Image (cartoon, grey):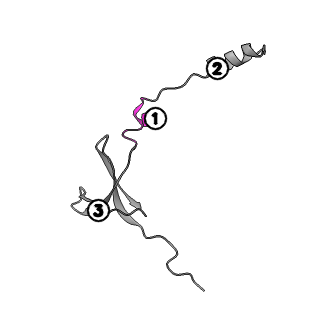
Amino acid sequence: MAKVDIHPKTQLVIFYDASADFKFLASSTKFSNETMEWEDGNTYPVIRVDTSSASHPFFTGKQRNVDIGGRVDKFNRKYNLKN
């Protein structure tokens, strides 16, 4: 017996990162009433996102590495541990 309608409906949507004015078209199960015209002339639902590869520090090269070495050294000194 086959199960009918067990998979979610997918559609093409525009993911829009307003902070970087970056958009990309992808398939998604998300739904939105807001629409926007894409480069191909078709209109698609828009899903607004807070962060994308255009604005995330890891992808933009602005990520700061946290140096935890100072904390480890402080812990070792506090408990008189040797490296």
Name the amino acid type tagged 3.
Tyr
**In the picture shown, does residue 48 fall above or below 42?**
above
Q: Quick one: quadrant of the N terminus?
A: bottom right
For image coordinates 64% across by 20% down, the residue present is 71
Camera-nearest residue between 73 and 78: 78
Q: Earlier in the sequence, mark 2 or mark 1?
A: 1
For image coordinates 43% across by 70% down, the residue present is 9
Q: Earlier in the sequence, mark 3 or mark 2?
A: 3
Residue 59: within the magenta?
yes
Q: Are marks 1 and 3 in contact (CB under 8 Å)?
A: no
**Residue linked to disc 1:** 58
- Crowding at mark 3 (Cα within 10 Å: few <14, some 14-19, many 20+): some
Judged from the image, the secondary structure of the residue bearing numbered disc 2 is helix
Total marks in image:
3
Instruction: Estimate the spatial distance between the alpha carbons at disc 3 and disc 2, rounded to whole Å.
Output: 50 Å
Residue 53: within the magenta?
yes
Name the amino acid type tagged 1.
Phe
Q: Taking 80 as reference, is 38 left or right? A: left
Judged from the image, the secondary structure of the residue bearing numbered disc 3 is strand
Hey, which quadrant is residue 67 in on the image? top right
Name the amino acid type tagged 2.
Arg
**In the picture shown, does residue 58 fall above or below 13?**
above
Query: Can you name the residue that lies furthest to the front here?
Result: 78
Q: Are marks 3 and 2 in contact (CB under 8 Å)?
A: no
Query: Can you name the residue that lies furthest to the left here?
Result: 41
- Crowding at mark 2 (Cα within 10 Å: few <14, some 14-19, many 20+): few
**Residue linked to disc 3:** 44
Q: Range of the magenta residues? A: 52-62
Q: Quick one: quadrant of the C terminus?
A: top right
